Amino acid sequence: MVKKVGIEVSVAVADAAKLANVDVIAAYPITPQTHIVEHLAQIVADGELDAAYIPVESEHSVMSACCGASATGARTFTATAGQGLELMHEVMYVASAMQLPIVMAVANRALSAPLSVWGDHSDAMAVRDTGWIQIFVENGQEAVDNVLCAFRIAEDQRVLLPVMIHLDGFYLSHVIEPVGFPEQSEVDQFIPPYQYPLPLNPDKPVTMGAFAPPFIYSEAKKVQDVNLRASKEVIMECWKEFGNRFKRHYSPVESYRSEGTKVLLLTMGSFGETAMTAIDKMRGEGKKVGLLKLRLWRPFPFAEIRQAVKGAEVLIVLDRSLSYGGPGGPVCSEIRSALYQQEKKPQVISFIGGLGGRDITPAGFEEIITRGIEISQTGSDQEFELFGVRE
């Protein structure tokens, strides 16, 4: 039986990496993820984990060190947030294109300027096209479970891609929650030993990331995209096996009280639990509204999204980042694109909120849903609405 303990989510994520028996941790501190690598540093220093801990001079160096470690066949982990993720940006393309199965926890944080250490999804959306698998979690238990799943997915010989686990900065990273940890023996059975097929070895030289002239570059990018899309099958297999073993089940799109409803709200990350409270209240008042929670961001779950909105007339999408000068939020844009050719599809309404860590209460979600229904009926002269902004 798994015993639950009260633990800070950042510390729980570090303990999950320990359970995965990582070989190399490259680290640079940045709020709000610092507690993750700080706790791992203590674990390694205390001899509880036999791993190389590499403190470097910047996040760019973090990802560079991770690439080198992973290329030798070492199970590699790191964590970052906000500006740190953006400083890694250049090297993240290298990690995915060279099929290096690094696992990284991202405590999502707003991007400067103005300077903010609080959580939104600006950083996650800025790296959405770097070729990484991206999974969003809404509480500490999901964070621990999906860090473990990330190693299983990334290192699968059919995948060999890096994975980001997104947990909301402060909303999750700094809160104490009850979290259950599997036994080490159970994790060892779930995550097989890592066998990288082409490790760097002086005795058997290989070329990695070589120069590609125009006549081969397009084919290389096509293969990369095919591989990322194909990883979805392995992700689904992993979540299914995890559910069978540990009785906690995950899917690309999760529904809450959405059966037979004409109005749906879609969220990502920790705000889903707050939105559930609003949905419960509105359902209790006889209003037929439901909730969708998008967990898998890359590869994008087209089929699951289309299935989840079948029969709905209005889909209200809450983004927590702003695509400046564009039609609204990145998530809403991709949802609209995914539904564009569907014969019957809901009207998609774009809201943006929670920027820079601004809270949205259950009452706020009620307001968003009510206003979304109003827009669907009367229209709006705006492409999107920024919720809660002062005039």
Image: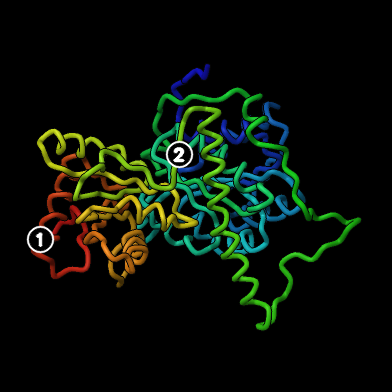
Q: Secondary structure at mark 2?
A: loop
Q: In the image, is 206 to the left or to the right of 190?
A: right
Whether residue 88 is visible here, answered yes or no, is no
Q: Nearer the viewer, residue 386 or 240?
A: 240
Place residue 190 in its image quadrant.
Answer: top right
In the rendered structure, which amino acid carries the disc numbered 2? Answer: Tyr
Whether residue 1 is visible here, answered yes or no, is yes
Which residue is located at x 57 percent, y 31 percent?
Answer: 15
Q: Which mark is residue 182?
A: none
Is residue 173 shown above or below 61? above
Q: Which mark is residue 250?
A: 2
Q: Position of residue 154 (x, y in %)?
A: 62, 48
Q: In the image, is 251 to the left or to the right of 219?
A: left
Place residue 258 in its image quadrant.
Answer: top left
Which residue is located at x 59 percent, y 54 percent?
Answer: 58
Q: Residue furthest right?
A: 203
Q: Position of residue 31 (x, y in %)?
A: 46, 45
Which residue is located at x 40 percent, y 52 percent?
Answer: 304
Q: In the image, is 198 to the left or to the right of 291?
A: right
Q: Secondary structure at mark 1?
A: helix
How far is the residue under mark 2 from the one under mark 1?
A: 34 Å
Which residue is located at x 67 percent, y 61 percent?
Answer: 98
Count of number-bearing discs: 2
Q: Nearer the viewer, residue 116 or 65?
A: 65
Mark 1 surroundings within 10 Å by alpha-carbon count, few (fewer than 14), some (14 through 19), many (20 or more): few
Residue bearing mark 1: 377
In the rendered structure, which amino acid carries the disc numbered 1? Answer: Gln
Place residue 316 in its image quadrant.
Answer: bottom left
Q: Earlier in the sequence, mark 2 or mark 1?
A: 2
Report the quarter where the C terminus lies.
bottom left
Q: Position of residue 231 (x, y in %)?
A: 57, 53
Q: Nearer the viewer, residue 389 or 19?
A: 19
